[in-house]
Image: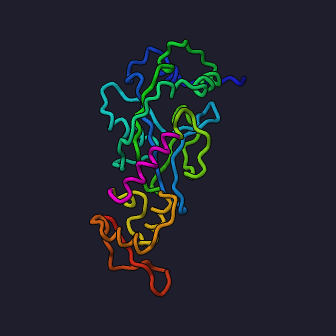
Amino acid sequence: MENIKVPEEFKVLISNRDKRYVRQCSIDCVVFGFAQNQMKVLLVQWKYLDKWTLPGGFIHQDEPIDQAANRILKERTGLEKLYLKQFATFGDPHRSRSKDMQQMLDAMGIFLPEDNWLFERFISIGYLALVNFDRVTPNTDLLSSVCGWHNLSEIPDLMFDHTHIIQTALGTLRKQLYTEPVGKYLLPEKFTMPELQKLYETILGEPLDRRNFAKKISSMSSVKRLKERKSGGAHRAPYLYTFI
């Protein structure tokens, strides 16, 4: 096996000497974007293993949980003040005791005793983030080689229970479509009604009736029709809308 230089920071992290973090608790973030009429999700590839996960991290002992989630997302996307909300807690007792973790450690040439804290039961707090695709600059860290977007319909095999976490986040997003200004965070500042409808159809995975959709959106106080129309279109170019 090729010799791998493991970062000293990671060696300290996995040892029982590191007391900076809350034990047996982590944060996993489902970051959704929208581009090319596709829902996108941000994923991380591990440097020492051809495996993918959601971006996540640990909570500092003196850190509020929401602040930890914002810190993790800023490190991964370069953005602050995101739409970021807790949506579920994942606590299956066997969710983190998988062969994936052992394979990663084996790839780094690291042996840990069975009572190491990484093998303990972990509860994950799931956060849902909505971002403007064009504003995100995906960033790696000391353990990841790639941080990038994947089509929601083409997600690779993920470690742990992260596929289930994404499915749960998508279900939450679908329930919030007409109560939260979802398009405000996923679309440009100005958009047409057909563009908004396409976003909703992509999230729901089904077509929507044009008239019923326009009527429902028009009843939302958070959406405003502008006087200007989209330029460069046909003779009757559609009106532009914005979220307020």
- Residue at x-position 49% and y-position 44%: 166
- Residue at x-position 45% and y-position 67%: 197
Nearest the viewer among 58 and 201 is 201
- Is any part of residue 197 visible from this angle? yes
Q: Pick out the residue farthest to the bottom.
A: 235
In the rendered image, residue 14, in percent from the top left (x then y), is placed at: 50, 20
Query: Magenta span covers which residues?
Result: 164-179
**Count the marks: how many?**
0
In the rendered image, residue 196, in percent from the top left (x then y), is placed at: 43, 66
Q: Is residue 204 above or below residue 92?
A: below
Is the stretch drawn in magenta largely helix, strand or loop? helix
Q: Is residue 165 magenta?
A: yes
Nearest the viewer among 206 and 182 is 206
Q: Is residue 142 above or below residue 87?
A: above
Quadrant for the C terminus in the image? bottom left
Q: How is the image coloured?
A: rainbow
Quadrant for the N terminus in the image? top right
Nearest the viewer among 169 and 239 is 169
Q: In which image quadrant can residue 240 be found?
A: bottom left
In the rendered image, residue 67, in percent from the top left (x then y), is placed at: 32, 37
- Residue at x-position 58% and y-position 34%: 46
Q: Is residue 202 above or below residue 89?
A: below
Q: Is residue 160 magenta?
A: no
- Is any part of residue 145 visible from this angle? no
In the rendered image, residue 175, in percent from the top left (x then y), is placed at: 39, 53
Q: Pick out the residue farthest to the left.
A: 221
- Residue at x-position 46% and y-position 44%: 168
Nearest the viewer among 222 and 4 is 222
In the image: residue 11, left or right of residue 229: right
